Image (spheres, rainbow, N blue to C red):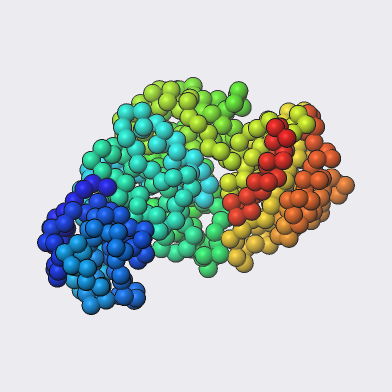
Amino acid sequence: MKKIELQEIIKAIGGTVISGHQNPAIHYVSRRSDSTLWKNHTMFFHPPGEKNLHIHSSIKSAVIITRNPARVKNYGSKVTIVKVENVRRAYWNFVYYYRSLFNIPFISVTGTCGKTTTKEMISWILAFDRKVNKTNKSQNVLAMNLNYLLNVDETTGATVIEAAVSSVGNLQTSCRYFRPQIGVLTSIGIDHLNGFPTFEAYRNEKAKIFSCVGSKGTVIVNSDDKHIRKLDLSRYKGKIIWYGKSKQSEFRIKDIHYGLNGMDFSLYHNRKKYKLFVPGYGEHNVYNAVAAIAVAYKLGVDIIESGRRLKSFKHIERHTQVLQGAKGSTLIDDTWSTNPTSILAALDVLKNISKDKKKIAVIGDIKWLGKHTQKAHLDVGEMVARSDVDFLITIGKDAGLISDRAIELGLNPKQVFKHQSAKEAYHTLNSIINQDTVVLVKTSMKQSFSTLIGKLKAYN
């Protein structure tokens, strides 16, 4: 956090010092009322509904923003009490003030699939010549946004934020913190529908990335996504940069091939052709890379240089991660998260790296779908039936629908196994894996299957 003093922000938050030091230094900001978790020089926004606040004896300096000073036990001069009319408004005014201190690129990445990898690729490219502040892995809940914002200081050269959407208003709230000038929309598919009344409501929430960036900003958009193409963008006044295989794409993808430990592809831009490579398997990985290249290009990094930097990109663990499996098998660990779109992408990786080997798909329940749960699992069953897998193993009650549908559409019942636990699934797998099999394990963070993955790795 950039070090500031209280008098720098007192006017912005609409506060009046009631007691304590008039101008203490502020090094940290917290919304957690447990003062044992604070550090010295913490500023705390005390919600009106909170119980009386007591400051831990280890705290030597703190600032309390409150509407009710009487609810804060007076610890003398080491605690500065600031009265405001509305704590929530004061908090957001502080957020706006702190964000306004920095004239650097803020990039917000959203989408049903690909946002974490795209965010990491953007950060990787930019980090070659500047300090990058970014969300950690897929840790993108709204409660973490304050800390991500406060991670920005005088040394930061760019901030790349993964903006998740699990209910109405999520994206707008994220934008209030970061006010990005550049947005990325990677895809819109079936996911987190338990927080929305309809799929259209979920799609519309993702589309708010355009209003978030605003008329002076730029949104980089996947031109090949069928749900994105249904969006009415005629009123958006900012700049849209399309990427994908379609002819409208400013960054056009062609000639995708599976190479050694990654993907070879051609990228066309401004009538020039670039032959590029990205570590990690899957056509979806190429889309992620091109979105990242487009962002970097917008920020002054040419395509050749971005391609050079991406060659050393460290692919994210548990995202279609290919490992040496037990008994000489090959293991694809895709257990970070799951939804129908990412399952389709993972099945494509399984098909393309298997060659003449037998293909085994292990699929768990898809979570957070609400009333769409049954249909989504049946749709995945259709994907599996079309994917030419040799064996299907499902784990969980809902995932059993995938097996049922795949059998209904022609998959051999003798090669389909429905289990309720990962332990049962392992016993089945252990009896069929060998050097001529490739195993895809696909599930969500909620299930993890870490024990199953551990048993399937080669060191066992």
Is residue 297 something one can see in this rendering?
yes
Depth check, front residue: 154 or 346: 154
Q: Quadrant of residue 33?
A: bottom left
Q: Looking at the image, how many numbered discs can be counted on the residues?
A: 0
Identified at 26% across, 43% down, the residue is: 153
Q: Picture coordinates of residue 365 (x, y %)?
A: 67, 56
Taking 274 as reference, is 36 left or right?
left
Q: Picture coordinates of residue 353 (x, y %)?
A: 68, 30
Taking 120 as reference, is 66 left or right?
left
Q: Quadrant of residue 324?
A: top right
Identified at 22% across, 58% down, the residue is: 61
Depth check, front residue: 231 or 319: 319
Farthest right residue in view: 414
Taking 44 as reference, is 112 left or right?
right
Q: Is residue 76 above or below residue 425?
A: below
Q: Picture coordinates of residue 28 (x, y %)?
A: 28, 53
Q: Is residue 200 above or below residue 434?
A: below
Depth check, front residue: 295 or 6: 6
Is residue 271 something one can see in this rendering?
no
Q: Quadrant of residue 297?
A: top left
Depth check, front residue: 370 or 319: 319
